[in-house]
Image: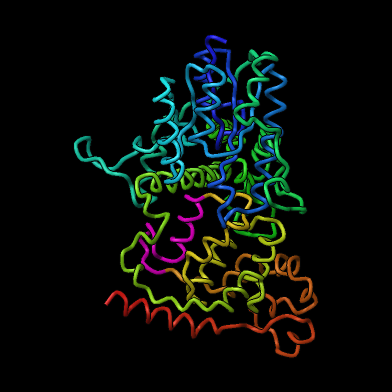
Amino acid sequence: MTNLVLFWHRRDLRLTDNVGLAEAFEHSPNLVSCFCFDPDILERDDIAPARMAYLLGCLESLEKAYRELGGHLLFLRGKPEDKIPELAQALGARAVYWNQDVEPYGRERDRRVKERLTQQSVEVHECWDQLLHPPGEVLTGTSNNCKPYTVYTPYWKNWSRQPKDQPITPPDSLQGLSEKDEQGLEGVGAIALPSLRDLGFTWDAPLILEPGEAAAKAQLESFCNQAIYSYDEQRNFPFNDGTSRLSPALKFGAIGIRDVWRATELVMDTTRSDEGRDNILSWQQELAWREFYQTVMYFFPELAEGPYREPWDRFPWQNDEQKFAAWCEGKTGFPIVDAAMRQLNQTGWMHNRCRMIVASFLTKDLIINWQWGEKYFMQTLIDGDLSANNGGWQWSASSGMDPKPLRIFNPASQAKKYDPEAEYIRHWLPEIRALETKDLVTGNIAPLDCEACGYPRAIVNHNEQQRLFKQIYKDLKG
């Protein structure tokens, strides 16, 4: 093929509303796509089995979609700086396209791949796809003194005023590889789609969202038909099905962000109540939070390694390993915390309100470094994303980009407000479901009841730990 181009999928596992793929197809319908299983990612110690299961399901769905268009999705395993140039050379590709990443590792990886391809005289085209507004498009200050935002509220005010692009049409047909071309791929290590076990992981539980573009679109449609109209009212109640559950699809790009935004605009245009519009706006603000965290990760890559606020480098964390293990296992004796951690361990997902509760508990009650919790979340979450996870944990630890200097959640107060009938607690802690609701919500479970139910007694006293944390914080600032 004389005019073949290669498209490299990463966090854009779909055909529709894919900027880089659309530009590659416009360059030439002689388009071959690939995905590379990178050992520098697979061999990390913070990869969640549920996340890998969802990824593989998305790739299986994407491969089928390519076949239906007459195209090919090829799979490689190895370092991208070796495999992508090798594949481009074997195919005689004139150009390679991909969508850019905001994370430090992804940006350095792409730099190495680009350098190798340039040495081979292969064109490289990098596009922005995963954000409605790429880094550098929404800035504070004047044209002569522009800076990235470090506080969400002014970022949202500016971001929300900017026009949003419309979804992008997918390719309607592709020219596949000939048998001769396919035979030539053996030399560059093209492989069949591996199984989860092939990659060294196991996951047997159901996923909270079926993998693939079609499932993500169906979930978006379902959410916009009903739950979005009461989103702000219901999103904080973990027992209710009030959130979109699209986070895995957004993490891996199984759905395009322009498609998502357009769906919110359509329901905003058709709803007649102020209450409905307020609820839709609340979800739009959550999409902006996603972009805010990705943008600050792009401009402040050091966030991936440590706190944003300098004094927190010196914070004297207690880091009790036994207490950390109890937190991980959902055995702290604080029912709302334990219920949330059991949900995470059993499903690979946790309700967002509960993420804030358990993060505050780890950092402010157990006085354990937020980075321990950040890593554990990445080891378990189906939607684990560096930018969002890091931003959420630093927000909870008070070490990040947050104008409020200190925020402490009381587990009992949170449960009383957001799980008042202990429905969520009873669901995930069946051993204590027969106890009185007030005891489950407050966590004031009698020692004899704990012993009878096989449930642990509280490993700390919240009021005492709160006072201790505040004193440490005061001393640190002084």
Percent position (x, y) of residue 63? 69, 28
Above or below, 125 relative to 225: above
Q: Quadrant of residue 123?
A: top left
Closer to the camera in the image, 446 or 392: 392
| Magenta region, residue range | 386-406
Q: Position of residue 269 (x, y in %)?
A: 55, 31
Position of residue 467 in the picture relative to residue 141 (left or right): right
Instruction: Give the image location of residue 172, x and y in percent.
Output: 64, 15
- What is the quadrant of residue 414 in the picture? bottom right
Residue 108 in view, yes or no: yes
Q: Depth check: 414 or 140 in front?
A: 140
Taking the view exactly as shown, the residue that stands out farthest to the front is 187
Residue 394 is covered by the magenta coloring: yes
Work out which quarter of the rendered image holds the C terminus and state it: bottom left
The reply, left or right, for residue 351 in relation to residue 81 is: right
- Relative to residue 395, is residue 274 depicted above or below? above
Q: Residue at x 59, y 48 (%)?
A: 42
| Quadrant containing the N terminus in the rendered view | top right
Residue sitting at x 32%, y 76%: 476
Against 347, is 25 above or below?
Answer: above
Query: Which image quadrant for residue 133?
Result: top left
277 in magenta: no
Q: Is residue 173 visible?
A: no
Q: How many marks?
A: 0
